[in-house]
Image: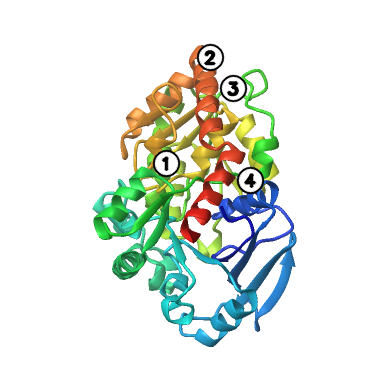
Amino acid sequence: MYIDMKILWFSNIKLTETQMSGSGTWISGMNDLLSTYYPDVQTANVTIAEIGTVREEIVRGRSQWVLPKKTTAKDVDLFVKIIDSYHPDIIQIWGTEFFWATIPFETICPNVPVILDMQGFYSSVLDVLYGDLTMQEIIRCFSIKEFLRPSSSLIALSRRLHKSVNREEEVIRKYKIISVQSNWVKENVNLLNPRATIYETRIALRPQFFQSVKWNINKMKPYTIFSTASMIEPTKGSFTLLKAFREVKRLLPQTKLLLAGSIQTGIRKSGYMRLMEQFIYSNGLGDSISFLGSLNTDDLIKTYLHSNVFVNPSYAESYSLILAESTYLGVPTVATYAGAMGELGNSDSLLYFSKYDYRSCASKIISILTNQVLAKRLSIQSMAFSEKKHDPKTVAATQFSIYNSVLK
C-alpha cells in the first residue's frame, strides 16, 4: 500500500482559505477530507482565473497554480514546467467540461497515470435543454439580452452544446482510467468506453455540513419551500417549480418560496428569466417568492434548516450535490427522478416525481407541508441514508483506495 503520494489536480475550482459557494465545492471538500484522514497524501491544484500571469501559491498547506484565463491546452511548456516542479505520482482531471482533459499528458508525462473524474454529461443536458417550455415560450426567451448578444440565446447554447458533446465523447474514449460518482454516470461511460478501468468514487460535502446541527421540525418555518434551482436555463427545472408553486399556493396560500442563486438584473437578465418573471407576475406570486442571491455555506445551511421542504426540480443531474446536502441535514425533500438523483435516496427518504410533471411535484410538496408525521419520517430516513453514503471517513478512504489501486 502506498502512503506517501503526490496527486496533481486540474480543476475549474480555485481553492481558497475562505468558504466556497457555487459549483464544484466537492473538490474543496475532498481536499479537506484527504488532509484530515490521509495527511501523507499531498494534493496540489491547477486552475485558472482572471489574472495576467501564472501565480503559484500555498492554500491550506497545499500548492496551487493559478493560470491566466487565456491559457489553452496548447500551452504545453507551461504544463511541463508545473509537472516537472511537482513530480506527481498521479494526475487527476476534474471533469470533461474544460480543456484540461484535452492536454496531451500521454506525451508530456507518459509514465504518470491520469484519472479522468466525471462531473457531468453534456449530452444529458442537451437532451433536456428546453425543459418543459412550449415553442411559443422558447421564442419568448429571445429578449433584450439575446438581441444584444445572440450568443447568449438558448439556440446558441444548443449549438455550443452539440460541439461540446462531440468533444466530450472523444475525451471519454481517450482515457484508460475514469472515476465516476454514480451508477448512472458509469452506465453512460461504459457505452462510450467499455475498455476503461472505472472506479466508483464518492462526493465530499463541505466541512460545515458535517459540523452542522440537523433539521428540526420544531425550529423550521412552516409552509416554507426552498430551492437552488438555477434561473439561468430551463435544464434545472425552475419553470416546472414555479408552475408547481402556483398549484401549492392555490390550496395553501400562506406558502412561501425561497430561491437561492445568482440574480440577473438590467440588460443582463436573460429572456428565460424574464419569461419566469412574467409568469410570477401574471399568477400573482410576487409577494410569495424571495430571491436570495448567492449564499455562502453558513447562510445556505441556515436556509436549509429554516425550510419546511427542499425541492430539486432539475432534469439532468450526474449526482446533485444540493440533494446530498439537503438529505444529509435531514430536510424533507422532493426531487425529480432524473439522472443519478434516484441513487441519493429511496421511497422512504425522498419523494420523487417525473420530470416536467409539475402537478406531481406540487402534490408531493403539499403532502410534506401538511403532514408532520411524513415530514419527520422523511427527515429521519434521509439522514440515515445520506450519512452512510456521505460519511467523511468513508469518502476519504474511497478516494485513497482509488489512488492506491492506480499506483499498483
Would you call the spot at circle 1 few (<14 residues within 10 Å), some (14-19), or many (20 or more)?
few
Give the alpha-carbon distance from disc 1 to disc 2, as whole Å: 32 Å
Instruction: Please tell me whether mark 3 or mark 1 is closer to you in this view.
Output: 3
Name which quarter of the figure residue 247 lies in.
top left
Q: Is residue 378 above or below residue 40?
A: above
Q: Residue furthest top?
A: 373
Q: Amino acid at mark 2?
A: Gln
**Residue pointed to by mark 4:** 206
The residue sitting at 70% across, 75% down in the picture is: 56
Q: Amino acid at mark 3?
A: Pro
Would you call the spot at circle 3 few (<14 residues within 10 Å), some (14-19), or many (20 or more)?
some
The residue sitting at 44% across, 35% down in the picture is: 344
Q: Nearer the viewer, residue 360 or 30?
A: 30
Q: Secondary structure at mark 2?
A: helix
Q: Is residue 292 left or right of residue 235?
A: right
The residue sitting at 61% across, 40% down in the picture is: 393
Upstream in sequence: badge 3 or badge 4: 4
Give the alpha-carbon distance from disc 1 to disc 4, as whole Å: 39 Å
Residue 162 drawn at (x, y percent): 29, 67
Instruction: Please tell me whether mark 3 or mark 4 is closer to you in this view.
Output: 4
Q: Secondary structure at mark 4?
A: loop
Give the alpha-carbon distance from disc 3 to disc 4, as whole Å: 27 Å
